[in-house]
Amino acid sequence: MSDLLSALTVFDWITPVVAEIQDIVNGPNASFVYLESSASGKDIFRKLKRKKINPWGWIGAPFGNEAVFTVREKDAPQAYKILLKMGVVLTSVPRAALTRRSPRLPSRVAVHVHCDYCDGLNDESRKRCEHCGARL
């Protein structure tokens, strides 16, 4: 059993490294965090690819219930609309996805945005980061 656990920890670094390389190759990007219980990663990727949006960097929490994936920043508003139509429960939406015409989220969902400076989570209504004070 300990050999299996040590083997798994060896591979733990691969997914983030590959995602980071994809971030560099694909340019400006935006990451969405969603509840895995609301949709499968395969379904999300399949639907986005049908609309010519190329998602990458899917990372699921091993013991949590959230997962994260990334799209190009320019595709974020369209990806956001698709995710809402699919009924995906989003727990963090990138600011690049929010436009004046963005559909409203159901009130039961708390939306958070990442600070570009410290990567802290903030409520979408905040104008400044509650962690470092940077402008959001």
Image: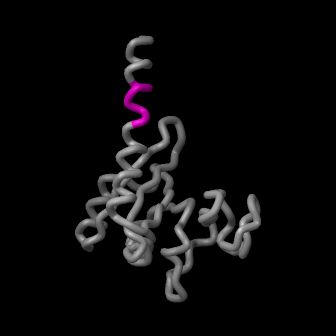
Place of residue 39 in the rendered image (x, y in percent of width and height, measured from the top left)? 40, 55
Which residue is pictured at 39% across the width and 71% down the height? 79
Which residue is pictured at 43% across the width and 77% down the height? 77
103 and 129: which is toward the camera: 129
Furthest residue to the bottom? 101
Place of residue 64 in the rendered image (x, y in percent of width and height, measured from the top left)? 54, 41
Q: Is residue 86 visible?
A: yes
Asked whether, in this view, residue 82 is left or right of residue 96, the answer is left
Asked if the magenta segment contains residue 40, the reply would be no
Q: Is residue 40 visible?
A: no
Look at the image and give the residue range highlighted in magenta.
Answer: 8-13
In the rendered view, would you say 121 is above or below 62?
Answer: below
Count of picture labels: 0
* Magenta stretch: dominant secondary structure: helix
Asked if the magenta segment contains residue 12, the reply would be yes
Place of residue 7 in the rendered image (x, y in percent of width and height, measured from the top left)? 38, 21
In the rendered view, would you say 116 is above or below 77?
Answer: above
Which residue is pictured at 39% across the width and 58% down the height? 23
Figure coloring: one colour
46 and 18: which is toward the camera: 18
- Image quarter of the N terminus: top left
In the rendered view, would you say 94 is above or below 17?
Answer: below
Which residue is pictured at 51% across the width and 49% down the height? 66
Which image quadrant for residue 51? bottom left
Which image quadrant for residue 121? bottom right
- Image quarter of the C terminus: bottom right
